[in-house]
C-alpha cells in the first residue's frame, strides 16, 4: 500500500466537508504536491456526482407510504393510554374555546389573516371532489402549527413562489391542489407572504402544510382531504359561496373551511389588538361585499 | 448531536418516517433484492418503531434507530429461514419501480438520468453485501459515518475504510459512466 492509499479517508471527509482544522490544512498541503491524490480526489468527486444524480435510488411506492402513515396513526390511538388522555384534554380545551368566544362578530381581525383566508378560499383549485366526515381537524391543525413553531416540523420546501411550492407537492399528496399564482396585495403592499411547505400526516394520510408569514407572525395552513377531515362548529362566516368556521383560543386561532373535497385549516397565534372589524379588514379589498355575518 | 423529542413523540416519529421512507425502502431493497419483501420490511420497521417510540430516550438518533430496526428485522428473518436470501432479478422498469423522475428536465436529460440511474443500481447490486449496504446507507440513506457505525455495530473507522473500498469497487464498475477514467479499474479492487 502506497503512502497515498492512507489518504482515502481524508479524501472522503474532504468531499463531505468534514475535514477541519489542522487536518484540513495538512490535507490541502498534501494535495498541492501530490498529483496522485489530486487524481484520486477527482475520481471520488465524479463518483459522488454520479451517485447523487441517481437519488433517490428507489422511491418508496405510494401505497407503502400510505400504509406506513396509517400504521403510525393506528398504533398511536391503540397503544397509548397517555395519548388518549392528552387527546381528551385537548378536546376539553377546544370545548372551552367555544364557550370562551366572547366576540360577537368576526373577532379574528388582522388584515393579513383575513386576506389570506379569502384568497386561499376563493382561489385554491383542488382536484379531488369528495366529502366524508371526520373529526379533530382543528385539534390536529393546532398541534401541527405548534410543532411547526417549535421547530419540530421544519419546512421541507422553502420558497416564496406559489408555483414552486405547488410543483413540490405534486405527487406527494393523495389529492391535487394548487396554490394561488400570486398573493392578494391590497394597496400594493403585501400583508403576508409564502415561506414554504412540508408534508405532515393527518389520520394516516399525507397532508400539506403551507407556511406563511406576516411581519410579526407565522401562519400555517393545513390542507387535507375532506374524506378524513370534518369542518364544522365555531363561528360561521360566509364569503364567496364558502362557509368559514373560526375558533379563537388564548394562544391560537383557527379558521377552517372546505372547498371541492379539500379541508383547510389556517392557524395562527396572533398578537396585538383584536379591535378591528371585518370591514376594517376588507375596506380596501374588492371582496368586502362577499362577507356575510 | 441527538434529536430532541417534542411533546408528541409519535407525531415526530411520523414526520421522520415520512422523510426517510425512500432511504429505508432503498436499504430494504438492497438487503432483500425483492420489492415485496422490501415493502414488508419497511412496514414492519414502522410498526416496531411506533410500539417502541415511547421508551426511546430523547437524545436518541431516530434516523439511525429506524435503519437499525430494519436491519435487525432482516437479520432475524434470515436466521429464521436458515437459508441464504433468495436472489430475485431486480425490476428495473421505471414505471413499476416508481423511480423518481424530474419532470423539469428536458427529454434528453431525462433519458440520460434514467440510464445513469439504472447503471448505478446495477453496479450497486454487483457489489458484495457489505459494500452494497454501506454505499446505500451513506449515499442514499444519507447517514453520517457515526450513524452507519451505529446501524452496522462497528467502529466509525471501519465504516470509513469499508466505504473507501466499496467506492473503489463501484468506480471500477461504473468506469464507463464516469467522466474521469478510473485508473483503479486497471488494478481491480475489494
Image (spheres, helix red, strand yellow):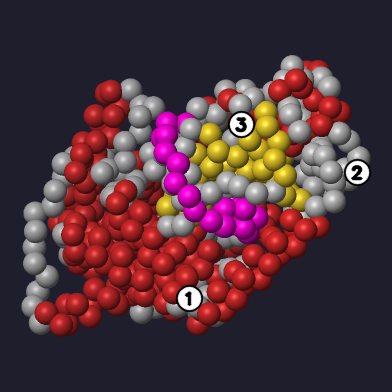
Does residue B183 appear in the picture of this structure?
Answer: no
Instruction: Single out the mark in the foreground, 2 or 1.
Output: 2
Dots 2 and 3 on the same chain = yes
Q: For residue B31, which quarter of the picture?
A: bottom left
Instruction: Single out the mark in the foreground, 2 or 3.
Output: 3
- Residue at 23% from the left image edge and 80% from the top image edge: B76
Q: Which region shows up in magenta?
A: A126-144
Gap in angstroms between the C-alphas marked 1 and 3: 41 Å
Q: Which mark is residue A242?
A: 3
Above or below for A122 versus B89: above
**Of residues B71 and A27, the one drawn nearer to the viewer in this rendering:** B71
Crowding near the residue tagged with mark 3, few <14, some 14–19, many ≥20 C-alpha atoms within 10 Å: some
Gap in angstroms between the C-alphas marked 2 and 1: 42 Å
Position of B53 with respect to B115 (left or right) is right
Q: Disc 1 designates what residue?
A: B53
- Residue at 37% from the left image edge and 75% from the top image edge: B48
| Residue A1 is a magenta residue | no
Q: For residue B22, which quarter of the picture?
A: bottom left
Gap in angstroms between the C-alphas marked 2 and 3: 27 Å
- For the C terminus of chain A, which image quadrant? top right
**Of residues A270 and B108, the one drawn nearer to the viewer in this rendering:** A270
Which of the chains bears the disc numbered 3? A
Does residue A77 appear in the picture of this structure?
Answer: yes
Q: Is label 2 in contact with label 3 (beta carbons under 8 Å)?
A: no
Amino acid at each position: 500500500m502506497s503512502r497515498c492509499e492512507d489518504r482515502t479517508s481524508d479524501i472522503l471527509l474532504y468531499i463531505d466537508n468534514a475535514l477541519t482544522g489542522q487536518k484540513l490544512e495538512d490535507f490541502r498541503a498534501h494535495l498541492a504536491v501530490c498529483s496522485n491524490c489530486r487524481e484520486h480526489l477527482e475520481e471520488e468527486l465524479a463518483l459522488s456526482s454520479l451517485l447523487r444524480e441517481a437519488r433517490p435510488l428507489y422511491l418508496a411506492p405510494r401505497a407503502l407510504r400510505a400504509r406506513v402513515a396509517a400504521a403510525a396513526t393506528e398504533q398511536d390511538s391503540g397503544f397509548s393510554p397517555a395519548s388518549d388522555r392528552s387527546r381528551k384534554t385537548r378536546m376539553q380545551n377546544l370545548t372551552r374555546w367555544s364557550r370562551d368566544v366572547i366576540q360577537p362578530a368576526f373577532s379574528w381581525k388582522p388584515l393579513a389573516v383575513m386576506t389570506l383566508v379569502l384568497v386561499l378560499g376563493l382561489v385554491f383549485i383542488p382536484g379531488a371532489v369528495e366529502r366524508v366526515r371526520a373529526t379533530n381537524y382543528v385539534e390536529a391543525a393546532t398541534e401541527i402549527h405548534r410543532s411547526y413553531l417549535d421547530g419540530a416540523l421544519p419546512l421541507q420546501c422553502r420558497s416564496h413562489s406559489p408555483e414552486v411550492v405547488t410543483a413540490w407537492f405534486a405527487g406527494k399528496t393523495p389529492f391535487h391542489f394548487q396554490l394561488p399564482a400570486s398573493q392578494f396585495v391590497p394597496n400594493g403592499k403585501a400583508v403576508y407572504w409564502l415561506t414554504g411547505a412540508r408534508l405532515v400526516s393527518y389520520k394516516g394520510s399525507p397532508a400539506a402544510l403551507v407556511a406563511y408569514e406576516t411581519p410579526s407572525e407565522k401562519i400555517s395552513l393545513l390542507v387535507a382531504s375532506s374524506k378524513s377531515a370534518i369542518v364544522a362548529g365555531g363561528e360561521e362566516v360566509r364569503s364567496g359561496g364558502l362557509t368559514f368556521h373560526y375558533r379563537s383560543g388564548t394562544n391560537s386561532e383557527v379558521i377552517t373551511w372546505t372547498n371541492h373535497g379539500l379541508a383547510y385549516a389556517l392557524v395562527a397565534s396572533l398578537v396585538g389588538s383584536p379591535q378591528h372589524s371585518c370591514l376594517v379588514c376588507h375596506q380596501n379589498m374588492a371582496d368586502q361585499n362577499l362577507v356575510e355575518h | 448531536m441527538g434529536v430532541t423529542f417534542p411533546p408528541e413523540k409519535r407525531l415526530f416519529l411520523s414526520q421522520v418516517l415520512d422523510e426517510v421512507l425512500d432511504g429505508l425502502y432503498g436499504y430494504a431493497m438492497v438487503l432483500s433484492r425483492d420489492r415485496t419483501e422490501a415493502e414488508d420490511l419497511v412496514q414492519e420497521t414502522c410498526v416496531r418503531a411506533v410500539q417502541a417510540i415511547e421508551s426511546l430516550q430523547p437524545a436518541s438518533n431516530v434516523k439511525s434507530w429506524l435503519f437499525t430496526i430494519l436491519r435487525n428485522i432482516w437479520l432475524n428473518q434470515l436466521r429464521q429461514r436458515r437459508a441464504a436470501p433468495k436472489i430475485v432479478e431486480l425490476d428495473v422498469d421505471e414505471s413499476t419501480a416508481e423511480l423518481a423522475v424530474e419532470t423539469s428536465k428536458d427529454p434528453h436529460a431525462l433519458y440520460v438520468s434514467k440510464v445513469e440511474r439504472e447503471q448505478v443500481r446495477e453496479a450497486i447490486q454487483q457489489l458484495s453485501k457489505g459494500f452494497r449496504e454501506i454505499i446505500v446507507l451513506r449515499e442514499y440513506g444519507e447517514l453520517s459515518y457515526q450513524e452507519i457505525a451505529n446501524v452496522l455495530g462497528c467502529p466509525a473507522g471501519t465504516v470509513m475504510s469499508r466505504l473507501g473500498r466499496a467506492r473503489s469497487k463501484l468506480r471500477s464498475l461504473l468506469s464507463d459512466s464516469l467522466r474521469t477514467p478510473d485508473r483503479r479499474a486497471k488494478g481491480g479492487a475489494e
